[in-house]
Image (cartoon, grey):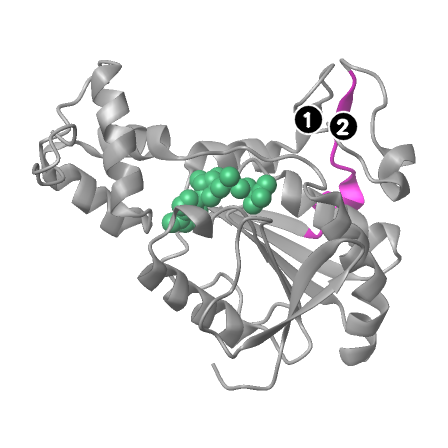
């Protein structure tokens, strides 16, 4: 298999890369590890030979779901400072936020919390390709651990509303549940909303091939009105796009949609 430099990536790796957008080297390397760990399927077969449960199980094993509330806190401080400007641009209409690749939901709930905390009306949609992650997200309950975990790093403005002691749980409040929904969706498909003022697509594109990233950025740009905000992960940058302008503050970057047509 891939341990031989001249070996072609297995058919299955190519099919998974095409289905998920994950880059072929990333998928091939992960499959290699799974094969070594005696994953119950032969990684040289075609996806067609796996039943739907096996396909899901295999793709699930390749995904990385690491996430937590208010991840990259500086970005949240910066976003918070820009909310009044966003609301003014929308003339007070409720804001729409999309957490694209939301994993187990912490990012989407952080967005819903922030809007409510700042007194702004709005709705949040969280999407992910992983069904099991979306089920956890929709459940909306997270336990604080001693270290790490979903509630590991709270910005000062949220401290009072989240558990301080290990073992305690945070349950999404009814007012946040009323404006937050989750759905299973691949980022290779069309966005789940036709308009979003804020899009978080963080720590997802790092695993995608550059062609997939280009298409995704164009689909995201098409639903963000001028002045809307895009957040990427710390290791992600926007290259070759004239659709967004970066801006800096609080030690973090965000991107603002400019007037260029998508
Ligand atoms: C590392 S997590 C990032 C979670 C969150 N955005 C954050 O930054 O904390 C990456 C998520 O992207 C999802 N993902 C990977 N490929 C995807 C695709 N093609 N469509 C939708 N979600 C995808 C994975 O299932 C995973 O939950």
Q: Is residue 2 left or right of residue 59?
A: left
Q: Position of residue 69 (x, y in %)?
A: 70, 37
Q: Which residue is mark 2?
A: 170
Marks 2/1: CA–CA distance: 5 Å
Q: Position of residue 134 (x, y in %)?
A: 51, 38
Residue in view at x 84 percent, y 17 percent? 165
Q: Which residue is mark 1?
A: 142
**Magenta part of the chain:** 168-179
Q: How dense is the environment of label 2, judged by Cα within 10 Å: few (below 14), some, or many (20 and up)?
A: some
Q: Determine if residue 85 is in view.
A: yes
Q: Is residue 235 magenta?
A: no
The residue lying toward the viewer, choosing from 255 and 178, is: 255
Quadrant position of residue 16: top left
Badges 2 and 1: C-beta atoms under 8 Å apart?
yes
Q: Is residue 8 left or right of residue 175?
A: left
Residue in view at x 56 percent, y 31 percent? 136
> In the rendered picture of this protein, how many numbered marks are placed on residues?
2
């Amino acid at each position: 298999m891939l341990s031989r430099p001249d070996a072609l990536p297995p058919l299955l790796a190519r099919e998974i890369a095409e289905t998920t957008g994950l880059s072929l080297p990333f998928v091939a390397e992960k499959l290699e590890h799974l094969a070594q760990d005696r994953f119950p399927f032969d990684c040289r077969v075609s996806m067609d030979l796996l039943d739907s449960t096996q396909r899901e199980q295999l793709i699930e094993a390749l995904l990385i779901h690491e996430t937590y509330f208010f991840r990259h806190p500086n970005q949240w401080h910066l976003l918070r400072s820009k909310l009044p400007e966003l609301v003014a641009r929308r003339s007070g209409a409720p804001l729409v936020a999309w957490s694209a690749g939301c994993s187990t939901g912490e990012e989407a709930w952080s967005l819903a919390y922030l809007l409510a905390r700042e007194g702004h009306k709005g709705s949040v949609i969280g999407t992910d390709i992983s069904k099991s992650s979306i089920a956890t997200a929709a459940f909306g309950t997270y336990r604080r651990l001693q270290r790490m975990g979903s509630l590991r790093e709270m910005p000062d403005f949220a401290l009072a509303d989240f558990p301080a002691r290990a073992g305690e749980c945070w349950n999404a409040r009814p007012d946040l549940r009323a404006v937050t929904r989750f759905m299973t969706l691949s980022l290779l498909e069309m966005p789940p909303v036709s308009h979003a003022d804020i899009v978080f697509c963080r720590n997802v594109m790092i695993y995608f091939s550059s062609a997939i990233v280009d298409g995704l950025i164009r689909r995201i740009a098409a639903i963000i009105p001028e002045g809307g905000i895009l957040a990427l992960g710390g290791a992600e940058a926007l290259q070759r796009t004239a659709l967004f302008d970066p801006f800096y503050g609080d030690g973090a970057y965000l991107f603002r949609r400019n007037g260029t047509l998508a």
